[in-house]
Image (cartoon, helix red, strand yellow):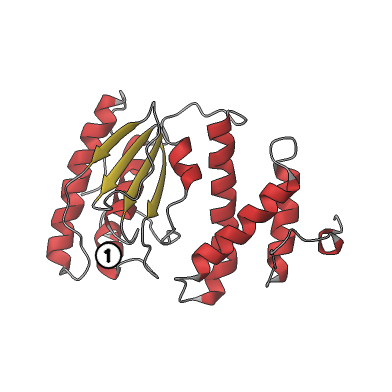
Amino acid sequence: MSDFTNRRPLPGLVYPEAYLARLADELSRKFTGIFATETVERYVLESYTGLLRTSKVKAHLASQTVRFATDRLTALAQAKGAILHDVPEVLFICEQNAGRSQMAAVITASLSGGRVHVRSAGSMPAAELNPSVVEAITELGLDIAEAFPKPLTDDVVQAADIVITMGCGDACPIYPGKTYQDWDLTDPAGLPLEEVRTIRDQITTKVEAMLATLGVTPTGVPS
């Protein structure tokens, strides 16, 4: 292991948790030749602080930071062309990343059977997923247990081929060469389960149509 903790830190950067130093060290090795160590260190700290703002369960913060930082660096590498991707990249964005965008992501992943890679984010992420959304998705036999709200970052937008917004206003940056869609869907926050199911089914219909434009035949979501 390198002597990460003995390096001179970047100006203004402070690592409040030891695991952040280990994570930065591991990711620096993983992305050797793609990103400078300073870039990786900055991404790790930004990912941690971004999740810390809304996290309620600090016990999950370490694992979420690992996944968030890794995914952001992977997205940035894809955008730079340093990591090739052979399936379409779809990004779903809503305000809280606790309902619509999370449902769309897990349904797309299931229907596409791995032929589409999905990410989701929120312009103003909530602290946790909407419990009714979790129940509505679980009813389909799909697993959303590992999902968590994530802030919208520029790197995941850059990596996306298709960006689908759901009521997040003008928060999403616009890049040429990408397909942008806005899905008019009711925010499930505060709604009873029956109405959340309706939104879930509307999302399924829209996902099926989106996959058709990509030439991907849905594999089927359990009913």
Q: Nearer the viewer, residue 48 or 147?
A: 48
Q: In the figure, is residue 163 to the left or right of 181?
A: right
Element assignment for label 1:
helix
As drawn, the residue found furthest toward the front would be: 11
Position of residue 148 measured from the top left corner of the image (x, y, whole percent): 43, 61
Please tell me which residue is depicted at 38% across the width and 56% down the height of the picture: 143
Tell me where residue 60 appears, x and y as whole percent: 53, 70
In the image, residue 35 above or below residue 1: above
Q: Is residue 145 left or right of residue 31?
A: left
Q: Residue at coordinates 44% horizontally, 58% vertically from top-left?
A: 150
Q: Which residue is mark 1?
A: 135
Quarter the N terminus occupies: bottom right
Q: What is the x, y in percent for residue 83?
A: 60, 31
Q: Tell me if 30 is positioned left or right of 73 in this view.
A: right
Residue at image coords 26%, 44% = 221
Residue ID at (25%, 67%): 132
For residue 44, above or below residue 82: below
Residue most toward the top? 215
**Residue 172 in the image, given as x and y percentages of width and height:** 36, 46
In this rendering, the answer to whether 23 lies above or below 160 is below
Query: Closest to the observer: 196 or 8?
Result: 8
Query: How many circles with numbers are drawn on the protein?
Result: 1
Q: As shown in the figure, which amino acid type bears the numbered disc 1?
A: Glu
Q: Within 10 angstroms of label 1, few (less than 14), some, or many (20 or more) residues?
A: some
